[in-house]
Amino acid sequence: MYFLQSDIALVQGEMASQTDIALLQCDMKKPALRLKHDLTLRLGGMLAASVPLVAALVKML
């Protein structure tokens, strides 16, 4: 992420268009969105795995 921030500073120093700056900022957000997506999938997987476990525990009662 540090690399992308330095790219933004370089682009701003060269009087680049606002579109170029916006694209670089968008690239910085992608890893955060990917991490959020991975955590959501992991949580969903844990919930799906717990359903049979809870069903087995209820069946034993």
Image (cartoon, rainbow, N blue to C red):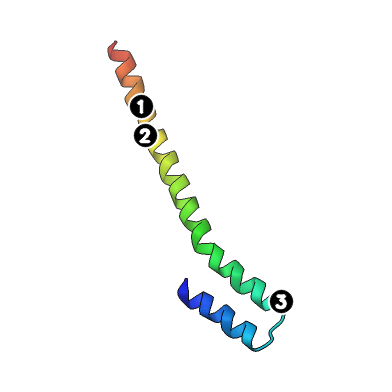
Residue corresponding to mark 2: 49
> Outermost residue toward the bottom?
14
Q: Is residue 40 above or below residue 4?
A: above
Picture coordinates of residue 20 (x, y %)?
A: 67, 78
Residue type for callout 1? Pro
Residue type for callout 2? Ala
Residue corresponding to mark 3: 18
> Outermost residue toward the top?
61
Pick the front one: 57 or 15: 15
Residue corresponding to mark 1: 52
Q: Crowdedness of circle 2 by 10 Å Cα count: few (<14), some, many (20+)?
A: few
What kind of element bears circle 2? helix
Q: Which mark is residue 61?
A: none
Residue type for callout 3? Gln
What kind of element bears circle 1? helix
Pick the front one: 24 or 57: 24
Q: Are marks 1 and 2 in contact (CB under 8 Å)?
A: yes
